[in-house]
Image (cartoon, grey):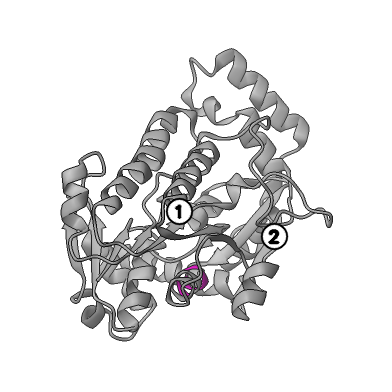
Amino acid sequence: MVFVTGATGILGRVIVLELLKKGKNVRAAKRPTSNLNEVRHSYTFYTENPDDFFNRIEWIDVDFDDILSLQEALKGIDEVYHCAAKVGFNPKDSKEIYHTNIKGTENLLYACEGAEVKKFLHVSSIAVLDNFNEKGELDEESDFNPKEDHSAYAISKHISEMEVWRASAEGLNVVIVNPGMIIGSGSWGNSSGDIFPTFEKNSFTFSGGTSYADVRDVAAISVELMEKNIFGERFIIISENRRYAELGKQIRKKLGLKEAKLLSQFQLNIGVLANTLFGWLIPALRMATRSNVKAISEMNIVSNEKIKSRLNYQFIPLTESIDFHLNNYINDKKIKQ
């Protein structure tokens, strides 16, 4: 049996579906407050038989602070996909991000030690990549540089990776995947599901960019790596590198909105200064940290050559991915109206 953490998230739910399509028995972690109807609804975007697959999932409430809870969840489990994480870039969330991402991973790996788990896939992020290769790109060898200014999320993911490599050194078969920003359907407004609402409500954008991957690609690659027993390595999963302004243009045009205005570096630097002076008084300004401004101002090129070569994988083009998930977002908005 397979155990998936973060199974109600944008990625976790699709990994669960991918496993079910392959005939696997899946135990899926959730919180007592999780909206399973929203997960069930999102399956309508990915399969013609959403209820048939959804009804095969064995849901279980898991407390990652409770080792006994984790040990109970791991009974009879031989494969784990660890997707659970707190994603965020607001400094006020730092404490929760560190606790959820680091302690949660640490406790899960500890629980695996006394279980029958043979395979462990950890979902990390491209946020941990720092040092560029000879082509000026970030790749799997781009080690985290602690001297750089990082968000709490990036730091938490780096430390989580260190916990996974420790478990690997102690004999657990592990593989780490580092996706870019995941484009998916459902959970609109939460984590990476916030991409369409954000571009819709904000009439401004930034000069930088990032790397993207369709959730269907991330799920398919993750499952294939585990099936082929590829362990002791990490793999970047991104389809394309794209500037925010270019992506925003496609999204806002489809939504019938005007093209977003580009904020200058000067305006962003003013935001950092305002945060320093008045962030204690105005919560909204606290997002204007140096690490956040750096992230939205830069355009680092991330390489996906390793995964394409190893699995001979063909990614869904980003434009096609955006159209597919944006249509789902638009249709869901119509249903709620």
Query: What residue is at 54 percent from the left and 31 percent from the top?
Result: 287
In this view, the residue in front, 50 or 173, is: 173
- Using the image, tell me which numbered label, if any, was put on residue 242: 2
Query: What residue is at 17 percent from the left and 58 percent from the top?
Result: 60
In this view, the residue in front, 209 or 76, is: 76
Residue 4 versus residue 199 in the image, above or below: below
The magenta segment: 216-220
Residue 9 versus residue 309 in the image, above or below: above
Q: Whole-percent x and y of residue 58?
A: 18, 68
In this view, the residue in front, 194 or 67, is: 67
Q: Residue furthest front?
A: 170
Element marked by disc 1: helix
Distance, label 1 to label 2, CA atoms, is 34 Å
Which image quarter holds the C terminus? bottom left
Q: Whole-percent x and y of residue 292?
A: 61, 36
Instruction: State the residue position of label 1.
Output: 168
Q: Whole-percent x and y of residue 308?
A: 65, 74
Residue kind at label 1, given as amino acid type? Ser
Residue kind at label 2, given as amino acid type? Arg
Q: How many marks?
A: 2
Residue 73 versus residue 42 in the image, above or below: above
> What is the magenta segment's predominant secondary structure?
helix
